[in-house]
């Protein structure tokens, strides 16, 4: 089954996910280049919400562009295995070598607005990330390594205190939603 079917069969958790899923499916039905940044209006990204074994902490990075603590993730860049993308990005951005999926099922689908910004000296216009998120697990004892071109920090943060670390209210809502889902399904 392909990534489009994974999104189509995903069962929304709430009204936000229902509406965002509809928007993502609209994009799937109307664009053939969502897996690449060639589509400058909207493209697929994949993120990892990385928790510890006890489900009490989340591994976050201090993102250079957004200047806040955030989850890991990135562009599909042509790779249709979105779980692989989430794991690859998590490893690259945190340095942790042993990251595994708690489930291969999608944790969340979200349309995320990205403001215009400069990346590596080039202006990137405002656009949408059609994001698929996976629930990942890592060992708190593993070495953490900063990826200087993307982040200025990597650390385990208390799951219930992410609002104290993120300056993006729209992202805090997503993190709270993930935490609620984890309590319901993986505690």
Image: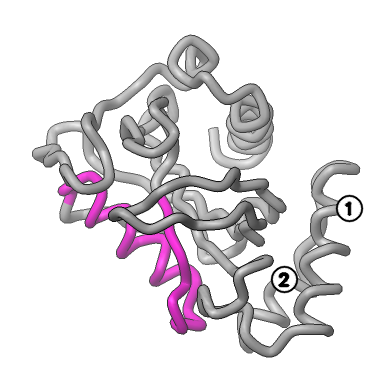
Count of all numbered marks drawn on residues in the image: 2
What residue is pinned by disc 1?
19
In the picture, measured across the screen, residue 63 lies left or right of residue 164, that is left
In the rendered image, residue 75 lying in the magenta stretch gets the answer yes
Q: Secondary structure at mark 1?
A: helix
CA separation, marks 2 and 1? Answer: 13 Å
Residue 12 is left or right of residue 49, and the answer is right
Q: Note whether 83 is above or below 118 in the view shown.
A: below
Residue 54 part of the magenta segment: no
Lower position in the chain sequence, tag 2 or tag 1: 2
Residue assigned mark 2: 7
User: Horizontally, is 71 left or right of 173 in the view?
Assistant: left
Which residues, given as a range, are shown in magenta? 73-96
Q: Residues within 10 Å of mark 1 (few under 14, many from 20)?
A: some
Q: Quadrant of residue 87?
A: bottom left
Quadrant in which residue 52 is drawn:
top left
């Amino acid at each position: 089954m392909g990534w489009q079917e994974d999104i189509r069969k995903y069962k929304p958790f709430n009204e936000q996910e229902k509406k965002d899923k509809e928007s993502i499916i609209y994009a799937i039905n109307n664009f053939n280049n969502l897996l690449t940044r060639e589509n400058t209006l909207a493209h697929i990204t994949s993120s990892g919400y990385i928790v510890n074994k006890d489900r009490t902490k989340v591994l976050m990075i201090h993102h250079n562009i957004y200047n806040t603590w955030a989850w890991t993730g990135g562009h599909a860049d042509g790779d249709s295995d979105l779980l692989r993308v989430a794991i690859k990005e998590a490893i690259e951005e945190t340095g942790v070598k042993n990251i595994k999926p708690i489930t291969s099922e999608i944790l969340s689908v979200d349309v995320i607005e990205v403001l215009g910004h400069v990346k590596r000296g080039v202006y990137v216009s405002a656009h949408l990330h059609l994001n698929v998120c996976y629930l990942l697990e890592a060992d708190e004892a593993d070495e953490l390594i900063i990826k200087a071109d993307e982040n200025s920090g990597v650390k385990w943060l208390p799951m219930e205190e992410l609002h104290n670390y993120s300056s993006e209210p729209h992202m805090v809502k997503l993190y709270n939603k993930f935490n609620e889902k984890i309590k319901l399904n993986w505690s």
